[in-house]
Amino acid sequence: MSVCRRCGREIEWAQGENGRFVPLDLEPVFVIEGGGNDQFYTDENAVIVGRVARPEEESPELPVAFVPHWKTCGRG
Ligand SMILES: [Zn+2]
């Protein structure tokens, strides 16, 4: 577990396919794959592309993944 030096929130590190480490938010989200161009990281460090599901779209059938922290850093 690490803490973001900028906003002080707890983050987790994932290693992307290109070997770079990416800071992730701790809270996973449901992802609509193909619904957008945002990148998310799964438990297996696989990258999926899409967008965060809206509350009314959330479903156990959707993939769950983690948001790169730079998307949310400084917010909330
Ligand atoms: Zn931060």
Image: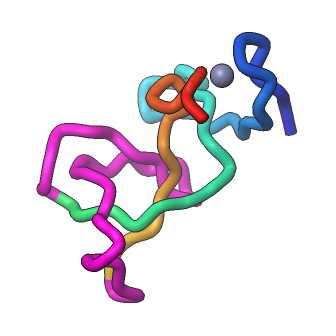
**Left or right relative to 16: residue 23:** right
* Residue at the farthest top position: 6
Task: Find residue 43 and report its horizontal and vertical position in percent.
Answer: 58, 59
Which of the colour schemes (rainbow, by chain, secondary structure, one colour) is used?
Answer: rainbow
Toward the bottom, the furthest residue is: 60
Q: State which quarter of the image contains the C terminus.
A: top right
In the rendered view, would you say 5 is above or below 19? above
Q: State the residue at coordinates (43%, 25%).
A: 18
Q: Residue 33 versus residue 71: which sits nearer the camera?
A: 71
Residue 33's quadrant in the figure? bottom left
Count up the numbered dots: 0
Q: Is residue 26 above or below residue 53?
A: above
Judge by depth and name the residue closer to the eye, 5 or 13: 5
Residue shown at the point (51%, 23%) measured from the top left: 70
Residue 23 highlighted magenta (yes or no):
no
Residue at screen point 62% across, 42% down: 25
Rendered view: 52 above or below 11: below
Check the image and name the residue furthest to the front.
Answer: 76
Q: Where is residue 11 in the image (x, y as percent from the top left)?
A: 73, 36
Image quarter in which the N terminus is found: top right
Residue 61 in the image: state x and y as whole percent: 33, 87
Position of 56 with respect to 13 (left or right) is left
Displayed-image quarter of ligand 1? top right
Residue 8: where, in percent of width, then height?
80, 23
In the rendered structure, which segment of residues is drawn in magenta?
34-61
Q: Is residue 54 magenta?
A: yes
Instruction: Please give left or right for residue 57 compared with residue 58 in the image.
Output: left
Q: Is residue 23 left or right of residue 66?
A: right
